[in-house]
Amino acid sequence: MTDLEKKARELLKQRGVELHDIAELVFFLQNKYQENLTMEDCYENVNSVLMKREVQNAILTGIQLDILAEQKKLDHPLQEIIATDESLYGIDEVIALSIVNVYGSIGFTNYGYIDKVKPGILEKLNDKTDGDCHTFLDDIVGAIAAAASSRLAHRAVHDVSIDDE
């Protein structure tokens, strides 16, 4: 595991996101389509997604912006935009889409759906009553789950692993 991957995983954990939380989202997205799906399959695919440099970079970038917003260290008006997760600010989704894109277009559908219904950890990350800022993190977590779900779907259709290099 590279230092970059270790740091990305560490930041997720520090911000209250466990691999189990993401694996549960993957299960939520895929259990209707894969009758023998196990949580082990979900973990495997989440771990594969987290091994991608593009994903690691998105995690580090997004979480750092969330932390800076919590510390009120961003300039106006960006501080207010990120701190309140302003609805017309779409850069958080753009970063998430960079993750989703790693495994093809099915990821966009998975991401759009999970971002809309906000199951599991996503509901908690969207709760703004605790004072934490997760403007980027909620979208990143949803995107990781969507990408892992896409990876699972590709494998199920082709019954082979897609190129993960």
Image (tube, rainbow, N blue to C red):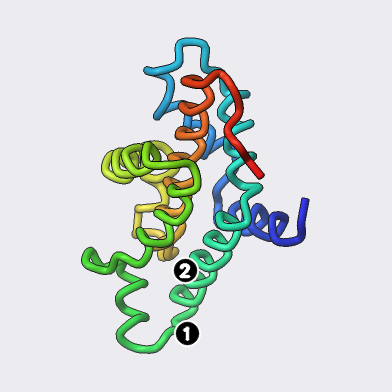
Label 2 to label 1: alpha-carbon separation: 10 Å
Q: Name, please, the residue furthest toward the bottom.
A: 75
Residue holding disc 1: 73
Residue 141 vertical position relative to residue 159 in the rendered view, above or below: below
Q: Residues within 10 Å of mark 1 (few under 14, many from 20)?
A: few
Please tell me which residue lies in front, 93 or 82.
Answer: 93
Nearer to me, 118 or 6: 6
Q: Residue at x 46, y 73 (%)?
A: 70
Q: Secondary structure at mark 1?
A: loop
Question: Disc number at residue 118?
Answer: none
Q: Are marks 2 and 1 in contact (CB under 8 Å)?
A: no
Please name whichever residue, 108 or 118, is drawn nearer the observer in this view of the structure.
Answer: 108
- Secondary structure under tag 2 reads helix
Q: Which residue is mark 2?
A: 66
Residue in the image at 46% along x and 53% along y = 140
Q: Please state the total of marks drawn on the protein image.
A: 2
Density class for disc 2 (Cα within 10 Å; few <14, some 14-19, many ≥20) is many
Q: Position of residue 38 (x, y in %)?
A: 56, 18
Residue in view at x 61 percent, y 28 percent: 161
Determine which quarter of the picture holds residue 2. bottom right
Q: Quadrant of the C terminus?
A: top right
**Residue ID at (30%, 69%):** 84
State the image coordinates of residue 52 (x, y, percent, origin top left): 62, 50
Task: Give left or right: position of 42 versus 133.
Answer: right
Work out which residue is located at the far left of the displayed protein and give it.
Answer: 88
Residue 128 spot, x, y in % from top left: 34, 59
Mark 1 or mark 2, which is nearer the start of the sequence? 2
The residue type indicated by label 2 comes to Asp
Above or below residue 36? Residue 14 is below
Viewer-nearest residue: 93 or 70: 93
Q: Amino acid at mark 1?
A: Lys
